[in-house]
Amino acid sequence: MWGGGYVTLWDNLKKFSRTEDLLGLSTYIDYDPENENHTEEDKEKMKFILDNHKLWKSINVWEEASKYFDWDKTKSTKYSGYLLNHTQKLAIDLSDYHKQSKYSTPDGLIMAIDAVPVLTETGEGTPMAFFDGITIETTEELVGTWCGDLLQIVEDLPKDYRLINCCFAEIWSKAKDYYRKFGVNDDGYVLKDSHGTLFEASGLDFYFKRVPLESIKAEVSDDKIRFSVKPKKKS
């Protein structure tokens, strides 16, 4: 569970009914916003959360956690093996996730949105990361759907787990990365591979739903690159 403050606002508490979920929220929520939109059921949930918050004792696990990756060298955990969801019997190939979601900065640093916070978020924070749009490959329908589930990373895929596709990538980081790697076509549109395939992305509306697919145009002026969104032409 990736805790976010927005879970106490509006009607987000309605998404949580399991006792273990409410206990998870109680690890970090320490006040009642007195939301006027809370139903009587939500008020009971808030009371349960606040009562249990007082019972937790925070401990520092950095020494134990740091053994699992070489932070000074890699700045990242390994993206290999499979991320399992034991609750739903699902699996994600972490290497494939990284391949789809990663991008490189101008100085060559490889970066990606970590999958676990997005899959397990509570407070609708992901739309902020995707405010400008997403790549066509992004699986935004998975956002928050693993919250409260039992997860584990393993080397081999169990036979009884279903492998699903997962990608979380925002529009501009990928556009700039593809531009540096593959350039543009004759019309100035950013390419996503060496075969001339256009990079396509999508905006997201207020309800986190996709708007029509779009291509990204790169225009160079005064040694500066300006990226702009161009609606895809209807056939």
Image (cartoon, rainbow, N blue to C red):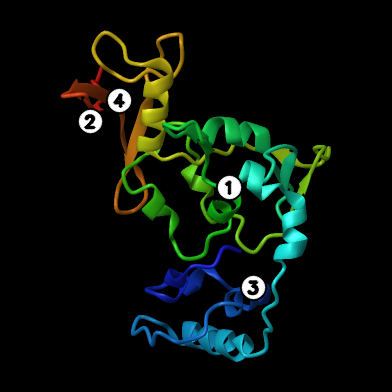
**Pointer 1: residues within 10 angstroms few (<14), some, or many (20+)?**
some
> Mark 3 near mark 4, Cβ–Cβ under 8 Å?
no
Label whose residue precedes the other's in the sequence (3 or 4): 3
Taking the view exactly as shown, the residue that stands out farthest to the front is 72
Tag in front: 3 or 4: 4
Q: Give the residue number, with chain letter if any, for mark 4.
A: 215
In this rendered view, identify the residue nearer to me: 200 or 77: 77
Q: Is residue 214 visible?
A: yes
Query: Which residue occupies 54% across, 31% down?
Result: 100
Amino acid at circle 3 = Arg
> Mark 1 near mark 4, Cβ–Cβ under 8 Å?
no
Q: Give the residue number, with chain letter if any, for mark 3.
A: 18
> Label 3 to label 2, Cα distance in Å?
44 Å
At mark 2, the secondary structure is strand
Q: Give the residue number, with chain letter if any, for mark 1.
A: 115
Q: Tell me residue 134's x, y (percent).
A: 39, 39
**Pointer 2: residues within 10 angstroms few (<14), some, or many (20+)?**
some
Q: Tell me residue 74's x, y (percent).
A: 64, 42
Q: Give the residue number, with chain letter if any, for mark 2.
A: 228
